[in-house]
């Protein structure tokens, strides 16, 4: 089974029915699986804070929601995380393509990579870092944990995890 | 007619709907006019009302009325293509277009100058866009609720605010009772 399929199977296992995405090269496979799955309503968004609004609405409507995005989006979404998701105590799994780590060919990606964990820590957002494929074994549990505690939770998935791109 | 007067007029029409209301003075005015569990007041995150309302409308069948503003729509302009491409008949976006950033001191917005939000919405692919005077908003909203097409209403209001108290309710209370109203 491909890692993309495994991620989507875990979303389904955790009863996630709504997913919004902003693309990243590393995420192409998982976005395609999300889009193809009949039990997930996939609504691509144009910016990640918009996506967090969509997820907030879907969750209040009774459907578990998740966002798939790149780590550069942390720079875009701090206000939405603090004053919407955290302030109203909403669960939000963030499956994040972690650009700018080992294997990164584009120098500019490193500039946000060096801030990513610090920003997440500053926001007290539980953060998991997948570096090897077997790290995804925890994904299902991370999703359940997110919906248990009603917090945003970050899963950073780096180039090693995706095995290059 | 300013926003507050328009909200007064539409109150009987939105009373039985789920309402997601824009941050700042619009939420304060709605809250002062009639507070109820079916109102979701945004206390932060300018611009996301239309997105929150869309997410809600897409996963359940009750009608969702979003009360947004011209400044907030401009802030989150990317929302309009998402709305247009994921239409649902239970979604009504009411843009209170008073040509100003009402909650921050009535600075002019571009919507009050050369930019037509109705044309922007049409250009983004929204199939049913109604622009009306503030005085016609109630009728436009009634028509939208009676039909089964997703509707964007651009209500041209005068700039100005009614000074109402800040909403002191805890956000988790707002959210929890709103979710109960959704599930009811
Ligand atoms: Mg305005």
Image (cartoon, coloured by chain):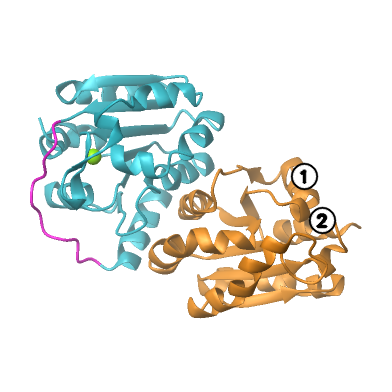
On whether residue B163 falls in the magenta region, the answer is yes
Identify the residue at image location x=82%, y=60%. A6
Q: Colour of chain A?
A: orange
Who's the residue at 63% across and 67% down the image? Answer: A111
Tell me what residue is drawn at x 60 percent, y 71 percent. Answer: A116
Q: Which chain is cyan?
A: B
Q: Residue A137: where, in percent of width, then height? A: 81, 73
- Classified by dominant secondary structure, the portion drawn in magenta counts as loop
Instruction: Specify the label residue A32 is tagged with.
Output: 1
Residue B144 is one of the magenta-drawn residues: no
> Would residue B81 be visible to someone looking at this image?
yes
Check the image and report above or below for B77 versus A8.
above
The x and y percentages for residue A36 are: 76, 41
The front one of B164 and A160 is A160
Residue span colored magenta: B158-169
| Quadrant position of residue B101 | top left
Residue A4, which numbered label? 2
* Left or right of B107, for residue A151: right
Q: Badge 2 local density, few (<14 within 10 Å), some, or many (20+)?
A: some
Mark 2: which secondary structure?
helix
């Amino acid at each position: 089974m491909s890692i993309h399929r495994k991620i989507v199977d875990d979303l389904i296992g955790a009863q996630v029915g709504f997913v919004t995405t902003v693309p990243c090269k590393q995420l192409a496979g998982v976005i395609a699986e999300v889009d193809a799955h009949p039990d997930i309503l996939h609504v691509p968004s144009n910016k990640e804070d918009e996506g967090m609004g969509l997820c907030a609405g879907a969750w209040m409507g009774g459907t578990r929601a998740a966002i798939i995005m790149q780590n550069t989006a942390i720079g875009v979404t701090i206000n939405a995380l603090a004053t919407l998701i955290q302030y109203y105590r909403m669960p939000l799994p963030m499956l994040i393509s972690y650009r700018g780590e080992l294997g990164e060919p584009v120098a500019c990606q490193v500039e946000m990579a060096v801030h990513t964990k610090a920003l997440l820590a500053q926001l007290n957002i539980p953060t998991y870092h997948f570096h090897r494929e077997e790290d995804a074994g925890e994904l299902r549990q991370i999703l359940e944990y997110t919906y248990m505690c009603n917090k945003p939770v970050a899963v950073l998935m780096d180039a090693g995890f995706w095995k290059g791109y | 007619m300013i926003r507050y007067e328009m909200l007064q007029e539409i109150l009987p029409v939105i009373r039985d709907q789920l309402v997601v209301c824009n941050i700042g003075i619009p939420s304060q005015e709605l809250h002062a006019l009639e507070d109820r569990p079916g109102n979701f007041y945004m206390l932060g995150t300018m611009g996301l009302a239309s997105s929150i309302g869309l997410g809600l409308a897409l996963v359940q069948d009750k009608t969702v009325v979003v009360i947004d503003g011209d400044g907030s729509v401009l802030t989150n302009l990317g929302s309009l293509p998402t709305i247009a491409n994921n239409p649902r008949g239970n979604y009504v976006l009411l843009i209170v277009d008073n040509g100003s950033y009402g909650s921050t001191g009535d600075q002019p917005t571009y919507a009050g100058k050369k930019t037509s939000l109705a044309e922007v919405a049409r250009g983004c692919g929204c199939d049913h866009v109604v622009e009306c005077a503030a005085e016609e908003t109630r009728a436009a909203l009634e028509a939208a609720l009676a039909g089964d097409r997703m509707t964007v209403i651009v209500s041209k209001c005068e700039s100005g605010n009614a000074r109402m108290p800040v909403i002191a309710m805890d956000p988790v209370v707002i959210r929890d009772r709103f979710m109960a109203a959704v599930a009811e």
